[in-house]
Amino acid sequence: MKLVGVSGAPAGEKTSLAVHDVLVAAQHLDASIQTELIDIREYEIEFSVGAPLSDYNDDTWNVVHKIASADFLVFGTPIYQASISGALKNLLDFFPDNAFKYKVTGIVSTGLSNKHFLVPEYQLKPILTYFKGLTPTNNVFVHNDCFDEESEAIIDRDASDRIQKLAHEMIYLQRGINNR
């Protein structure tokens, strides 16, 4: 199985590190799982205007193809102004309505205010469900205070435990889908 993590943060390290931690946790649980992190900061993804995918640049096409070919996915977003990042929403606009059918789609978010912990539940989860993705029972919100100021690694035990539980649930659910 291949697990692809998507960091939808156009700036900063925290979201990418949180998504990476989910990928690492999944590999610790099952060494046969292949992982790949797509950090949108490393690609020149064009603005979606509804044209066929073949009309967009190579970076856009390659990122969409990598996501579409994954067995299961974890999406990460920073919370900006009580919303998911526009960069992530733009990326999701490239997919057809059944793009994540039979795929588990986990959610990790980062933010400065604890008031934003439900943003992914009410904004990103409906989008992933529209694409027929199966979302685990819990998403993971990691407050900015959970990161070390210098290394930006997650130092909060509770946040790390929730990441571990998300990885475990994602693997369990995806195996169930694959074995149906």
Image (cartoon, grey):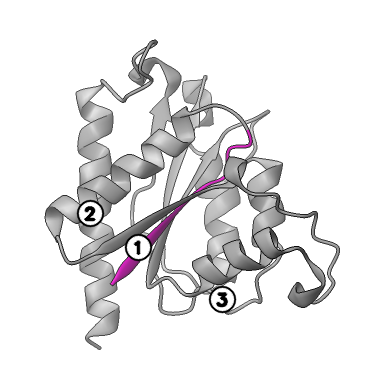
- Residue on which disc 1 sits: 3
The amino acid marked with disc number 3 is Ala
Badge 1 vs badge 3, beta-carbon distance below 8 Å: no
Q: Disc 2 on helix, strand or loop?
A: helix
**Residue found at x 20% / y 25%:** 157
Q: Which residues are magenta?
A: 1-10
**Residue found at x 24% / y 58%:** 169
Question: Camera-side residue: 96 or 28?
Answer: 28
Question: Camera-side residue: 59 or 133?
Answer: 59
**Residue found at x 23% / y 54%:** 26
Looking at the image, is mark 2 or mark 3 nearer the viewer? 2
Q: Residues within 10 Å of mark 2 (few under 14, many from 20)?
A: many
- Residue on which disc 2 sits: 26
The amino acid marked with disc number 2 is Ala
The location of residue 144, given as percent across then percent down, is 44, 20
Badge 2 vs badge 1, beta-carbon distance below 8 Å: yes
Q: Quadrant of the C terminus?
A: bottom left
Question: Camera-side residue: 67 or 137?
Answer: 67
The disc placed on residue 99 is 3
Of mark 1 and mark 3, the one earlier in the sequence is 1
The amino acid marked with disc number 1 is Leu
The location of residue 12, given as percent across then percent down, is 55, 26
**Residue found at x 47% / y 75%:** 69
Does residue 145 sit above or below 111 in this rendering? Answer: above
Does residue 163 sit above or below 4 in this rendering? Answer: above
